Amino acid sequence: MKKLFIIILLALFLPLGVLAQQEEMFKARVLQVLDQKENIDEAGVLLLQQNLKLKALDGSFAGQEITFYGIDDFQVVSGQVYEAGDRVVVNHRQDEAGKDVFFVLDYDRTNPIIWLACIFILSVIFIGRWKGLRSLIGLVASFVVILKFIIPQIVAGSNPILISVTGSIVILFFAIYLTQGFGRKSHLANLALVTSLLFTAVLSVFFTHLAQLSGYLGEETIFLLESSQGSINLQGLLLAGIMLGTLGVLDDVIISQISTVEQIKLANPNLSKKQVYKMSLKVGVDHITSMINTLFFAYAGVALPMLILFSQSDVLGLNLTQVINNEMIATEIIRTLLGSIGLVFSIPIANFLASYFLSVKK
């Protein structure tokens, strides 16, 4: 999937002139496994390589039979083992001599993803009704902001943290006003979200520089540097990722807390603002404990290989200090802690604003 991710990036960067040569990606079906052979790579890992006869399903080669030489050219891209009938994603380019070269990148997973997306959309609309539909529209708007504003601006060399914070605020406005309507509740939610997000951004900038995190986390970062000719600020890109990762959790927590304050005021309009604040904060404390676990497991799922490395430190002959000071592991630890701190401080901010400035009518 790593190579497929790189090809997707190439497709995104194509309008910006990043590609040095013409490439095409299309879908194909495996007609026949022509040959199969075991090889050992430089790291001593056993690889099963194949020569495949394929039939292109779309693109400029649609309907044509082509051959992928995974053994002769010793080209291993995905490391998958294919059988006749499998649908795959193929990349085509021409070498210096003008000869067509094909790479089988991975399985074509388009159909199951589309079916799952349809089930998700129908579930949200069935359960959430009109509000669910509005939330889906907000999701699409957020996706457009990321693809059409945040990513192009970062690729163009703009400050990633500034762009991500600006883009996040735009996303928040779409998400809040589409789902909650245009009113004081939405205004307060946006104010609390922007305040919490800016606080997290300042904290992230400070500790990223203090920990001297460079943002070099793997092959993708090296590829981005080469393709952009060094115009992308990787440290800023890391900060942008922290902002976007924290955004969804803040949205969930702050909307929930403001709704809690609203219901407390509706249940007992005679309570003072201070009493409402204290009662809602007790709910917020319970929310914090659950959401911190949510945030941790979200990051842990992405960083699972690094957690395995952490657990195998004794076997690898590494002490705890060496493991923690590995930049990849340190990055995930700092990312999780920053998101959690932003989450913790968003609770009293949202509760205070809602308790003192939200008016409700029975």
Image: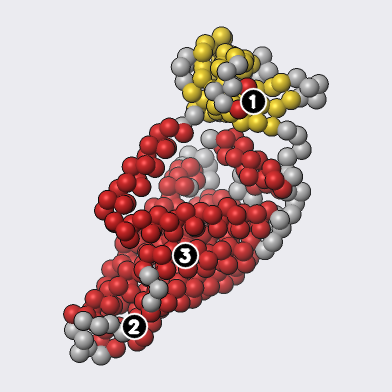
| Label 1 crowd bin: few (<14), some (14–19), many (20+), radius 10 Å | few
- Residue at 65 percent across and 47 percent down: it is 221
Task: Measuring from the top left, give residue 174's x and y in whole percent.
Answer: 47, 64
- Residue at 28 percent across and 82 percent down: it is 360
Which secondary structure lies at badge 3? helix
- Whether residue 187 appears in this view of the structure is yes
- Residue at 59 percent across and 70 percent down: it is 206
Q: Which numbered disc flags the more N-terminal residue, 3 or 2?
A: 3
Task: Measuring from the top left, give residue 56's x and y in whole percent.
Answer: 57, 21
- Identified by mark 1, the residue type is Ser
Residue 321, placed above or below residue 175: above
Task: Measuring from the top left, give residue 63's x and y in whole percent.
Answer: 57, 18
Q: Which numbered disc flags the more N-terminal residue, 1 or 2?
A: 1
Which secondary structure lies at badge 1? helix
Residue 153, placed above or below residue 286: above
Q: Quadrant of residue 227?
A: top right
Q: Which numbered disc flags the more N-terminal residue, 1 or 3?
A: 1
Residue 19, placed above or below residue 298: above
Disc number for residue 60: 1
Work out which quarter of the rendered image holds the C terminus and state it. bottom left
Residue identified by numbered label 3: 174
